[in-house]
């Protein structure tokens, strides 16, 4: 048995936090500690956390963002493995057990496929329906976009701490996980995937009603940082241009419901970097016809 520390950052999560914690408590892998880091909540969610008593370790700190809360939990963890679970997501009962079964001595991170639920809108039910779930050396694949769901990640603690954890820059909120996974892969850490959708990712209006300009800027910032890493300098020009195109393409897709002409413009920027992607031309046509 391997002790796993489950880390749940919580900020004003009163509506969902109990359900999330219960999904962690009900794991079939029992050698687990659960650390919940309340990040300065003001909605009364701390009272619900206290109801769990000694089944969780509750840490309270001033608001500093999810990256800081996760790092706090990691520093206090006793487990060899760190499992991260956002305060509005859920796990299937056998998630940790099945991930640990894949965690050989060469593996530093195991993640799972995921199911989307809640106000999903245009989202596919299952992540693997629209994204390839890569494993092994995934640095180049991660430059093209993040396919590792934060709430699905099980990470060897010593590797996490070696890399300094998540970047706590508040300008990276919503993409700090992608930034970390890129650094993780660049350092040569190996990744495995559990193909079963053992993580449930909740969509709700807070996630959907994003500032799309800010999110696009954040994605671009992560990519620019990544391209300055040593391994990125060895990539082909095609890989670099595809990665840049993907930032604009992904940003356009998320923005298309709220502002289809902004999306058309961003799809156009994507084509400036990689004009051979026929799916982008089709997306521009759909946006122009109002069929997002």
Image (cartoon, rainbow, N blue to C red):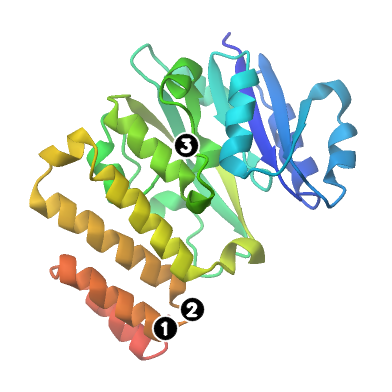
Q: Is residue 115 visible?
A: yes
Q: Is residue 72 left or right of residue 274?
A: right
Out of 215 and 34, give the one closest to the viewer: 215
Circle 2 crowding by C-alpha within 10 Å: few under 14, some 14–19, many from 20: some
Q: Which residue is mark 3?
A: 112
The residue mark sitting in front, 2 or 3, is 2
- x 47%, y 38%: residue: 167
Image height of 231 relative to 263, above or below: above
Image height of 260 relative to 237, above or below: below
- x 52%, y 37%: residue: 152
N-terminal of the pair, mark 3 or mark 1, is 3
Out of 12 and 96, give the one closest to the viewer: 12
Q: Position of residue 92 (x, y in %)?
A: 62, 36
State the SS at label 3.
Answer: strand
Alpha-carbon span between mark 2 and mark 3:
28 Å
Quarter of image, res 260: bottom left
Q: Position of residue 50 (x, y in %)?
A: 88, 33
Q: Residue furthest top?
A: 1
Q: Is residue 44 left or right of residue 7?
A: right
Q: Is residue 93 visible?
A: no
Query: Badges 3 and 1: C-beta atoms under 8 Å apart?
Result: no
- Name the quarter where the C terminus is drawn: bottom left
Circle 3 crowding by C-alpha within 10 Å: few under 14, some 14–19, many from 20: many
Which numbered tag is attached to residue 257?
Answer: 2
- x 24%, y 63%: residue: 245
Q: Which residue is mark 1?
A: 260
Q: Position of residue 155 (x, y in %)?
A: 48, 25
N-terminal of the pair, mark 2 or mark 3, is 3
Query: Badges 2 and 1: C-beta atoms under 8 Å apart?
Result: yes
Quarter of image, res 74: top right
Q: Is residue 244 left or right of residue 288?
A: left
């Amino acid at each position: 048995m391997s002790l796993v520390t489950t880390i749940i950052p919580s900020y004003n999560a009163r509506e969902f936090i109990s359900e999330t914690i219960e999904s962690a408590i009900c794991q079939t892998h029992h050698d687990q500690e659960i650390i919940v880091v309340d990040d300065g909540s003001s909605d009364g969610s701390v009272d619900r956390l206290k109801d769990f008593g000694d089944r969780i370790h509750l840490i309270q700190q001033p608001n500093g963002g999810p990256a800081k809360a996760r790092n706090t939990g990691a520093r206090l963890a006793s487990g060899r493995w760190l499992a991260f679970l956002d305060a509005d997501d859920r796990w299937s009962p056998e998630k940790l057990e099945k991930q640990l079964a894949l965690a050989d001595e060469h593996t530093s991170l195991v993640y799972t496929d995921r199911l989307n639920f809640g106000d999903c809108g245009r989202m596919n039910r299952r992540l693997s329906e629209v994204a390839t779930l890569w494993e092994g050396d995934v640095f180049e694949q991660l430059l093209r976009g993040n396919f590792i769901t934060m709430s699905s990640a099980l990470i060897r603690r010593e590797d996490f701490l070696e890399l300094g954890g998540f970047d706590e820059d508040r300008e990276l909120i919503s993409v700090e996980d992608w930034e970390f996974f890129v650094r993780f892969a660049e350092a040569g850490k190996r990744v495995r995937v559990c193909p079963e959708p053992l993580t449930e990712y909740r969509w709700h209006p807070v996630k959907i009603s994003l500032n799309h300009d800010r999110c696009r800027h954040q994605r671009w910032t992560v990519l620019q940082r990544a391209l300055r890493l040593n391994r990125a300098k060895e990539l082909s020009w095609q890989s670099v241009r595809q990665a840049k195109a993907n930032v604009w393409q992904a940003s356009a897709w998320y923005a298309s419901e709220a502002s289809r002409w902004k999306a058309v413009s961003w799809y156009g920027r994507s084509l400036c970097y990689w004009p051979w992607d026929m799916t982008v031309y089709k997306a521009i046509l759909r946006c122009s016809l109002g069929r997002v």
